[in-house]
Image: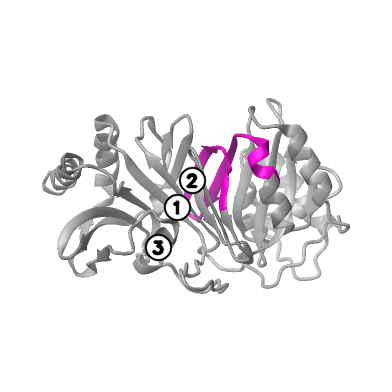
Amino acid sequence: MNLNPIYTDPYSPQALKQEWSELRLAMPRLRIREAAATLNVSEAELLATGCGSTVTRLNLDWPEIFKALPAIGPVMALTRNDFAVHETTGLYTVIHHSDESCRVKSDAVNLQLLTQVIHVAFGVMEPSLNETRFSLQFFAANGLAIHKIYMTEDSDLSIYHALVKQLTSADQSQHQTIDSPPRFSRFNIATFNTGRITQSTHLLCDTEDFYAGLIAMGIVSDLVETDTSNLEFLAPDLFQPLLNKIASQGLSIGICVRNYGCIQVYQGPIHNIRITGPWFNILDEYFSLHLNTEALSGFRVNTQSIDGKQELKTLEIVDANHQIIALILLNADQDTSSMNLWEVLISGEVSG
C-alpha cells in the first residue's frame, strides 16, 4: 500500500477510497484529519468518497439549518486547529445570524461561525462496533474542516435526518472539487475583523486577531487594551501544574480555540485533567479540550487594562512560530478576590 500518494486534479475517488480503506485496516485509530494528511488530500475530498453510502453532500441553506439546530436538542460542537480540539455539549441556540456569520450562545455552546468561509457541507454517518455517530460537518473551499456538529444520545435524530433529507444536494458524486489544494504544513488562520470578514487563508493569527474575535463575541470588552510590551513568557512544563491548580481551586475560566472560520469558547470551571501520550486533555461532562503538547513551545501571560488599570490576564498558548494555539482567560465578571487568586497562581508558577 502506498501511504503517501500524490493526487492531482482530477484524481480518482475510487482509488482514494481504496487507499483510505487499506489505511484504516493498517491504522484503525487514525482520525480522518490525519488520514487526509497521510494521503495528501483535503479532509473534504476524503470524506466525499463516502457519498452514496455513509455521507450525504448538503446544500448550504443556512436559514433552514439555523431553524432546525435548536429543535434537535443537545449536540456536541467541535472546533479545532492543527494542535487543539475544543468540544462543548449543549443546546445550539442561534442568537444572531447574517449573510456573513452566525453567533451562537446557549447553556454551554458559545461560538462565532463565519458562514462566508464555508463552501461545503456533509451529513455524516460513522458506524462503529459500539454506536453509530451522526454529524453535520462544514468545510472551507480548500477542503479544510471549519466546524462539526455531532448528535448526542439526547439529540432528536428524527429532526436531524429530516434536515439532511431536506438539504440533500443533487450532486452526490464521490469527487469533491476544491478551490486550492491544501498542500501546507500548518493551519493557516484568517483575520476575524469586527467590521468586515476576510476570506483569505494565508493570514496567520496574531494576538490582535484573536482578541478581535473575542470582542466580536462579547467575551472581552472592546474597552480592554492589550499591552504587548509587558508579555511574560512561561516555559511549557509549567502549563500542566498551572491548570491543575486552576482545577483544584474551582476557578472559572474561559478557554478559546479558533481556526480561520470559527472561534469557540468554553466558560466555567474545569475538573478532570488527563495526559495521554503527547495530549493534554480536559475531559469534563459538557466540555473537552485536547491540546498537543508537542506543538506547545510555551505560553505567555498577557496583561490587559482599562484606563491604565490592570483588569485581566490571559494565557496565550503558542507554537514554535509564536502563533496562538489556544487562549485561556479569567472570566471578566470575576470578583477581585478571584482576580487576586489568578495573580497568585501565575506568580507561583513563575517563581516556583
Report which residue position mark 3 lands on: 210
Q: Secondary structure at mark 2?
A: strand
Q: Amino acid at mark 3?
A: Phe
Numbered marks: total: 3
The one of 10 and 119 positioned closer to us in this rendering: 119
The answer to whether residue 179 shows anywhere in this view is yes
- The magenta stretch spans which residues? 68-95
Mark with earlier residue (1, 3): 3
Q: Residue furthest left?
A: 351
Any part of residue 50 in sight: no
Residue 189 place in picture, x, y as percent: 49, 66
For label 2, the crowd category at 10 Å Cα-Cα, with few meaning under 14, some 14 to 19 and many 20 or more, is many
Q: Residue at x 24, y 53 (%)?
A: 235
What whole-number distance in Å separates the C-alpha atoms at marks 2 and 1? 6 Å
Is label 2 in contact with label 1 (beta carbons under 8 Å)? yes
Q: Residues within 10 Å of mark 3 (few under 14, many from 20)?
A: many
Q: Tell me the residue that label 1 is attached to.
A: 257
Residue 91 as seen in the image, left or right of residue 65: left
Q: Residue at x 19, y 45 (%)?
A: 339
Q: CA distance from mark 1 to mark 3?
A: 9 Å
Residue 86, numbered label? 2
Q: Secondary structure at mark 3?
A: helix
Amino acid, disc 2: His
